[in-house]
Image (cartoon, rainbow, N blue to C red):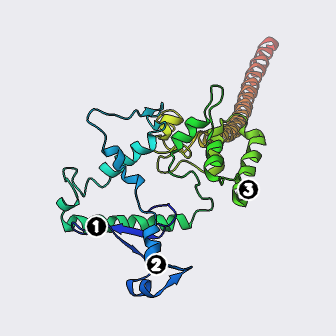
Amino acid sequence: MSSRKGSRGSTRRVDGGSNLQSQSSNQPTHSEGANSNVGGRSSQGSQQNKRKRGPTRVLNKFGLRPGEKLSVQFNTLGQAIGPNATHFAHILGSTLKHSNIVSLQAEGWWKVSKEEKDKLWKEITAVAEKNSGNRALLEVFHTGGSKSFACYREDMTTEDYEPTQIDLFMKTHAKKNGKVTEILVCKHEKFDEYLANQESASLTPNEFYITATGPVRHGRMHGYGLGAPPSKVLGPKTSGQSSFGSYSQVCNKLGNVLNEMDQLKTNMCERIEERVQEETKKIEERVQEETKKIEERMEERIQEKMMAFMAQYTQQCQQNRR
């Protein structure tokens, strides 16, 4: 599928060794084209003026002289940047894409069997339908064209400032005349509101962008393009962080764990205090019982000694009288 004007809604297929044939639901049939005129032009004339697929075939780059090379620059993430980055991506795409179906050793389409072409055609149409469905769900459309995120980031980077994901989002989703949609304004207001929130003071711009828009999905960082996984942008994750989507989620999870630990500690202290009180009460009761028993035994012994003393005293008195 192509985003160029005049080719939207059309798909192209290669049959055998014939030329490219265009099939479009918006394109009139041969009988209709022969009898219809639009603005004084026939449909045949409009087809001749229709812009065909050309730049992505990079035929001028494949025809370089022997030994002639194009200079391609790469950033720290290994992404192509500079004036030849787009041509480099087109060459890789036209050479390596779908190499699992069409062998790279094929000299041309005439060397590709009809079965392989049919299989490739089914795969391309399936991807096109899936992309059409996904595009229908988008609220904000990308306006950056074929220029990669890495090239946009390189152009916006200065010696003192490196663009954030928010900067890249606004740059690649605003119209060329500077106008923005209401949804884009709402998203920017959401970013500003989150920035003003005290909870975001400890987060980096990329971290609160992830928090505001949602966690990283499918291992892709928004605003960085292909070849920039979260591990390269946010740093490697430890084993304890592997189950979390972002730094903010780790902080929230850690806060919840600390709260649970404090609550558990409070509950444990209360239980220990209750247990100590129960044990203290039992000990006091036992002490009282033992004290009472000791007092009773001492009283019995005192009485026994008093009785023995009185008996001895009485006996001695009787002997003295005699």
Question: Mark 2: few, some, or many residues within 10 Å (few <14, many ≥20)?
Answer: many
- Residues at discs 1 and 3 in contact (Cβ within 8 Å): no
Question: Can you say whether 71 is above or below 314 in the image?
Answer: below
Instruction: Indicate which disc, 2 or 3, sits on the residue closer to the N terminus.
Output: 2
Between circles 1 and 2, the one closer to the viewer is 2
Who is closer to the viewer here, 288 or 176? 176
Q: Which one is in front in this view, the residue at disc 2 or the one at disc 3?
A: 2
Q: Is residue 157 left or right of residue 47?
A: right
Which residue is disc 3 drawn over?
A: 186
On the image, the x and y values in percent for residue 257 come to 62, 40
Instruction: Name the spot of residue 172 as percent of width and height, x first.
Output: 60, 49
User: In the picture provided, is 115 more to the left or to the right than 219?
Assistant: left
Badge 3 local density, few (<14 within 10 Å), some, or many (20+)? few
Secondary structure category for the residue under label 3: helix
Marked residue nearer the N-terminal end (1 or 3)? 1
Label ID, residue 225: none
> How far apart, in angstroms, are the residues tagged by discs 1 and 3?
48 Å
According to the picture, the residue beneath numbered tag 1 turns out to be 19
User: Which numbered mark, 1 or 3, is in the foreground of this view?
Assistant: 1
What's under tag 1, amino acid-wise? Asn
Amino acid of disc 2: Ser
On the question of residue 237 being in view, the answer is no
**Residue at image point 48% right, 85% down:** 36
Question: Which residue type carries mark 3?
Answer: Cys
Which label's residue is closer to the chain start, 1 or 2?
A: 1
Residue pictured at 65% horizontal, 30% vertical? 161
Circle 2 residue = 43
> In the rendered view, would you say 276 is above or below 180?
above
Measured Cα–Cα span from mark 2 to mark 3: 43 Å
Judge whether residue 222 can be spotted in this image.
Answer: yes
